Amino acid sequence: MQGKRYDQRVLVLVEVRGEQRDWDEAERAFDQQGWPVVAAFARGEGASQGVLSADASARLYSVEVRFFGARNRRTEQAAEWWVQRLARRTRLEMYARRCEPVDRDREQLTGWRAHTVAHRPPRVPDPRPLTPMARLRRSAVMARARLAEGSGRHDTGTLVRGTASEALRLSRMDLPGGSAPEAAIDVRTRHGRERRHIVQRREEDHRRVTSRVMAWTFAMLFCVVVARQASGARTWVWGTAAVLCLLWSAWLTRDVFAEGGRVGSILTWGVATVFLLAVALGADMGETRGWTPVQVLSVFAVTATSTGIWLLVRQWTWGEWLAWAAPLLFALVASCVVASGSVMHALYADSLDLTPDDLDVPALWQAASALKLLSFLSFALFVPALWGIAKHVHASFVSPVERFGVLSYVVAQVAVVLFCTLGALDSAGDAVKELRTAAAQKAELPSYFGVEPEWMCVEPTVLAAKLSSRGGVLRPEQPYVSFGEAGGTVSLWDEPAGKALQMPAEQVRLVPAADGRVRCTFSYESLPKGD
């Protein structure tokens, strides 16, 4: 059972029906799962005496079921699902008769450092009353002493954890095998954020409360951004929702600590909230700038995806990662980069009746387009991320015994991949539309991942009868959209005709034009008679 990792422990009373060989098989299955057997007894005996009727063909096991996931209202149900899954896999008649969680949430004990107090001024009662100046000098000495203690100058090197009174007693305790501590010892908190009146929550409980505060604060931020861009009654609706989210998150912030610390936690939350609002709605020199609802949702999607993928893969061991997950991931990414290096350029060229070879795109820009395509397909990770979050919170539709869970996952994954693929295809289509719009307006031409179209006057170096053009007839008096030379061929885009025009590079000369409104001055009469 060594090396088995888990989040939750639930004590389950498992009933196994059958004969001795069935019970032996169940015990082996428990051991393979890493579930310790606390006790075993026949039904109607031991702890079940007087509770369940005696049955010689049934045996009860008190098993500690261990599994990954969060601690919530469905944790006990999840333990029953794992027992049912084991029963199906081993083909044994096995039932979870009682599930009881084992509390393993750890306390967050306050850390203290021990230090000497010999540097402090002696507290000797003085029969004479101190003058105001003497009182001021004494206060200054004490302030310097406290400052020196806070800087760690007088630390003894001893670290203790517990309440304030426990920490002081622990620091003065004789540790077996250690040196006797000094009598004049005091303690101070390690980070300065703990105080004697503050009691922190347990780890998982604290994480759960903090997550709720962050979620409601983010919801408030989204409502504010939407309300800013809305109009009419929708502004009031979204604004009211933002205020409600703000009040609820502030109320939850009061409970970040088990006892005390409410003022400090609310103050910290308030500063963080004001900062987020300033970033989301920030105004700079009178020009309104800030986030859009789509950007806020993108931040949420990235956060949810990262969290969900981590919750999903954290169950894998390093051996599994090194054995198959990492090589598979590397092979997938490498093959996608190599295979999709020119996909975006191919779609771009096809929309212009060209081929990728006609564009002569550098390898660096092909790799950049591949990364762009992968960025579209990365949204497909959203489904497994949600799957990981659902498994972590023990959602019923992803339970180990749900028969249609895998089918629903596959359907959702295929739908998202198709959606992302269409988004990648639209990227090239939008770029072509922008190019055609700019060409029709005779304006500056947009680039696309290393493709730099330019306005060019095309001057033939041979007579019109000898010019080998494909896709139409060259009119030297008008400028063309040129994609440069590739493979000995010049590729042009004839906007009035709405099609591509190609000709050998040795038969023409390209002269840059300011834009599409200029008129080229070439005439075939300027060519030598021999040409």
Image (spheres, rainbow, N blue to C red):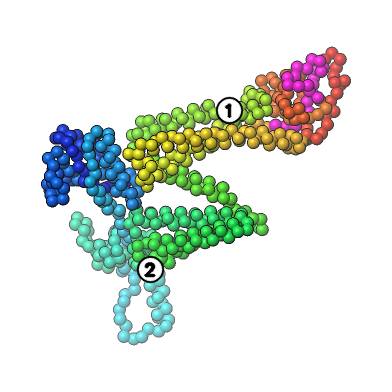
Q: Quadrant of residue 463?
A: top right
**What is the quadrant of the C terminus in the image?**
top right
Q: Amino acid at mark 2?
A: Arg
**Which residue is tagged 2?**
146
Is disc 2 surrounded by few (<14), some (14 to 19) or many (20+) residues within 10 Å?
some
In the visual, does 363 lie left or right of 322? Answer: right
Q: Residue at x 77, y 23 (%)?
A: 509
Q: Are marks 2 and 1 in contact (CB under 8 Å)?
A: no
Q: Please state the horizontal and vertical placement of residue 384, each as a whole percent of the image.
A: 43, 39
From the viewer's perspective, is 342 left or right of 109? right
Q: Position of residue 182 (x, y in %)?
A: 25, 65
Asked whether the viewer can see residue 317, the reply is yes
* Mark 1 residue type: Ser
Identify the mark nearer the N-term, 2 or 1: 2
Is residue 466 in the magenta section? yes
Q: Residue furthest front?
A: 53
- Highlighted magenta segment, given as a residue range: 453-475
- Direction from residue 395 to residue 292 in the image, left or right: right
Q: Label 1, on which residue?
A: 342
How much space separates mark 2 and mark 1, taking CA atoms? 67 Å
Of residues 239 and 511, the one drawn nearer to the viewer in this rendering: 239
On-image quarter of the N terminus: top left
